Image (cartoon, grey):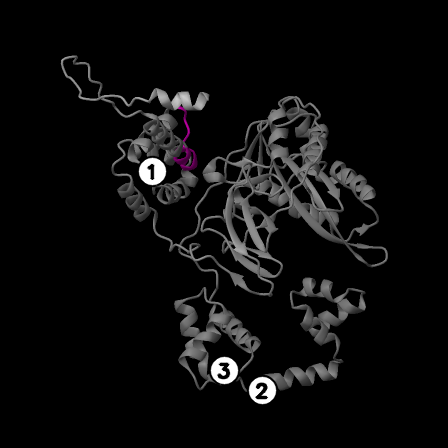
Amino acid sequence: MWYKVTELNSQGFNKSQISKAVGIDRATVRKYLSMVEVDFIAWISNSKRRPKKLQDYVHYIKKTLKEHPYLSSAQIEDRIKENFPDAPEVSSKTVYNTVQAIRAEYDIKKNQSNHQRIYEKLPEVPYGSESQVDFGSYSMVTRERLRCKVYFFVMVLSRLRQKYLYFQDRPFTSGTTIDSHNQAFDYFAGQPKHILYDQDRVLIKDENLGDLILVQQFQQYISEMKFTPIFCRKSDPESKGKIENVVGYVKKNFLRGREYTNIESLNEAALSWLERTGNGQPHAGTKKVPHQEWLIEQNHLLPYYHQKKKSKQLMRYKVRKDNTINYKSNFYSLPLGTYKGSNTYVLIKTEDNTLFISSDTKNQSLLTTHRLCHNRGETIRNTDHRREKSKSLETLKIEVLKLYSDVPSYKQYTALIETDKTRYYRDNLLKLKSGRENLESTSIEESIKFCITHDKFNANTMLEVAHSYQVREQTNKKSVRPNVEVFTDKSIKIDFAPQRSKISTYESIMK
């Protein structure tokens, strides 16, 4: 390894390139290059004779890893401290090296799992049916040996793998993403019937239990176009594997080793690369040339009408996985369930030393408020923002069923939700559970009938309609006048004489 590192260094490779080429850490490359051959031989020989500080704990580490192969070296270090208080003090790096050596010697792989996802290769889609979209970024080198990060948009027609590629020197916004769509449709001479996306923040605001809320600008754009957007759920790369492969292909085949001059030249080179290689060479999977297949597919694409709109951006704060936001180096809690994925955002404002946090939706409803903290690194939490322990779906179904046992149509409605929004069924149940309080069963029953009639299979919608029904019913009750008994029997005599004024009172006033 030392000879290989020094040979690559003599050929002009830098430390990062050598690290990638030989598969060792950059710090190790730097250490090897700092030693001449004699010093290196002496060092490696000495290290082999050096006693291992954790030698007495190898058996325990091996046994623990075999029983729990997914444990990290940090967890192993903690287990050693817990079970062996007299163990020698060693650095975390030493523990890591020992754990890695034991894994290699006894073939204990970390990513062992009994719950692997089972899926099959899907058949090819029809001509003109589908395309996939994704974004990427890459750090290029200029002539002055400076680093310059570029961002790119890529679209691929799923059937024939015809690709379009566009670069810019800043992150994509909703407006520049729409412009990139327009250029791609110009390049393809049409638009597909469906386009698959990740849940990117420039396109989607909220999953909303399956009724997706898109960024307003993109929602307006697709309403004027003919294609239907399809958003994949997070952690599901197989759903759009074609575009994932294209992103890697662009980085490895087109960008790697290319010198950056300016964004215009890069886009010109990208179009030439597409014509020459990206779309001009046979695809490894289909064994067909994408450009030749495109000559057939363009007749199946929907017509394209160019659209251009101006972008309008809002200032937002990203929600962390633990349902908090990081504002001025402090963490402020949000209600449980606010986080709905990596593209969850909220709107904030400060007033009178108070932080107001609202939902990033059309109505911008207030989620919570906090007193501003002027320290750093603090966590400011409301007592009602408590974390609920996860439960199985069956347990959750039973709990919610008990809450709605007095609503006759509940089972029918949740069955329709499960059929219509299978992937969001659990989310809808959680919403039904949290929203049941203070709602009467009659209002819920009326709301469910309304939602079934109008095909609204969404817990948010049902609860809002139920609340509306209940408010209307309460208003009607308040407006009803009380019954007043009127006596019509003339035979009943009431002994009552009206009060009379004296005439002398008026005479004195007139004087």
Q: Are marks 3 and 1 in contact (CB under 8 Å)?
A: no
- Image position of 360 (left or right of 308): left
Q: Residues within 10 Å of mark 1 (few under 14, many from 20)?
A: some
Lower position in the chain sequence, tag 3 or tag 1? 3
Check residue 500 for magenta coloring.
no
Report x, y in % for residue 266.
80, 44
Quarter of the figure that contains the N terminus = bottom right
- Give the residue at mark 3: 54
Give the CA separation, mark 2 to mark 1. 72 Å
Check residue 455 for magenta coloring.
yes
Determine whether the residue tagged by mark 3 lies in a helix, strand or loop: loop
Determine whether the residue tagged by mark 1 lies in a helix, strand or loop: loop
The residue type indicated by label 1 comes to Leu
Q: Nearer the viewer, mark 2 or mark 1?
A: 1
Give the CA separation, mark 3 to mark 2. 12 Å
Report x, y in % for residue 295.
69, 26
The disc placed on residue 416 is none
Lower position in the chain sequence, tag 2 or tag 1? 2
Determine whether the residue tagged by mark 2 lies in a helix, strand or loop: loop
- Give the residue at mark 1: 439
Q: Nearer the viewer, mark 3 or mark 1?
A: 1
Q: Residues within 10 Å of mark 2 (few under 14, many from 20)?
A: few
Q: The magenta stretch spans which residues? A: 454-464
Q: In which quarter of the view is residue 145 placed?
A: bottom right
132 vs 180, nearest the viewer: 180
The residue type indicated by label 2 comes to Arg
- 354 to 407, vertically: above or below: below
Residue at image point 62% right, 38% down: 133
- Give the residue at mark 2: 50
